[in-house]
Image (tube, coloured by chain):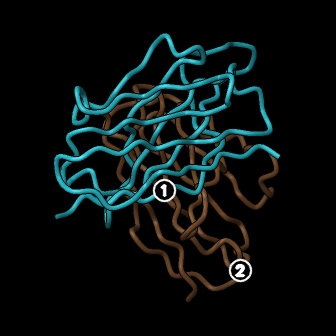
Chain colours: A cyan, B brown
Amino acid sequence: EVQLVESGGGLVQPGGSLRLSCAASGFTFNTYWMIWVRQAPEKGLEWVADIKHDGSDQYFVESVKGRFTISRDNAKNSLYLQMNSLRAEDTAVYYCARLTQWVRGVIMTNSYYMDVWGKGTTVTVSS
Amino acid sequence: EIMMTQYPATLSVSPGERATLSCRASQSVSSSLAWYQHKPGQAPRLLVYGASTRATGIPARFSGGGSGTEFTLTISSLQSEDFAVYYCQQYINWWTFGQGTKVEIK
């Protein structure tokens, strides 16, 4: 069974740090791009960061650049999100998801959608 | 950034009835559009990608349509397990989501 399980969430003070983990199973982890998505209370879903299958490229939403890093350990089938200088507005449920390349007919596009998600881990930034 | 707008925010439907959810993009996303179902405490579930292709294991009562800026997700006959929040998402230019439509029991 294809599965993603997040962990590492919790309560942290503003300015603090937290490291989220995502354990993958049931698929060949090192062949997929992966992504973190978050949902703040009463808000919509927001892409946070994504990483290439070999870890060589990473991309971030503007609001977390310079504060968050994304990494992966393909030997451990694990994805990570290191969050530093946390702010109240980072409070959210954080989901990891697998990205799959969209094949349109016989054409492999440069677009990717999220086909497998975890249940999420909650991060609360508050004093 | 491409903005995604979903309507209505809430849809009240009786079991067995048809539900039609709408999603509008602020600019054309071609067919780079996905729909997800989300229940509290569960992982979001991919229903449709490419605007109209059902994901693996998704029942035929779910169907997606549209292209460009206007999209729909239709649930032909609502089952009890279909009451949830549904999100559309564009993936032509990074990823942005609509605010969701909650399908509730009438």
Residue position for label 2: B80
Q: Which chain contains the residue that carries disc 1?
A: A
Is residue B46 positioned above or below B15 on the image? above
Q: Residue at x 53, y 38 (%)?
A: B33
Q: Residue at x 54, y 22 (%)?
A: A111
Question: x, y percentage for residue A40?
Answer: 32, 58
Query: Outermost residue toward the bottom?
Result: B106
Disc 1 residue type (three-letter): Thr
How far apart marks 1 and 2 lie (CA) works out to 27 Å
Share a chain, discs 1 and 2?
Answer: no
Residue position for label 1: A121
- Mark 2 secondary-structure assignment: helix
Q: Which of the 4 quarters of the picture holds residue A60?
A: top left
Disc 2 residue type (three-letter): Ser
Is residue B92 positioned above or below B19 on the image? above
Is residue A60 positioned above or below B72 on the image? above
Give the left or right position of residue B15, taking residue A72 as reference: right
Front-most of residues A30 and B45: A30
Q: Which chain contains the residue that carries disc 2?
A: B
Question: x, y percentage for residue A106?
Answer: 75, 14
Is residue A61 positioned above or below A107 on the image? below
Question: x, y percentage for residue B8?
Answer: 40, 67
Disc nearest the viewer among 1 and 2: 1
Question: x, y percentage for residue B54?
Answer: 73, 45
Q: Which mark is residue B49?
A: none
Q: Residue at x 67, y 29 (%)?
A: A76
Q: Quadrant of the C terminus of chain A?
A: bottom left
- Contact, CB < 8 Å: mark 1 with mark 2? no
Q: Residue at x 31, y 33 (%)?
A: A68
Front-most of residues A26 and B54: A26
Front-most of residues B76 and A67: A67
Q: Which of the 4 quarters of the picture holds residue B43?
A: bottom right
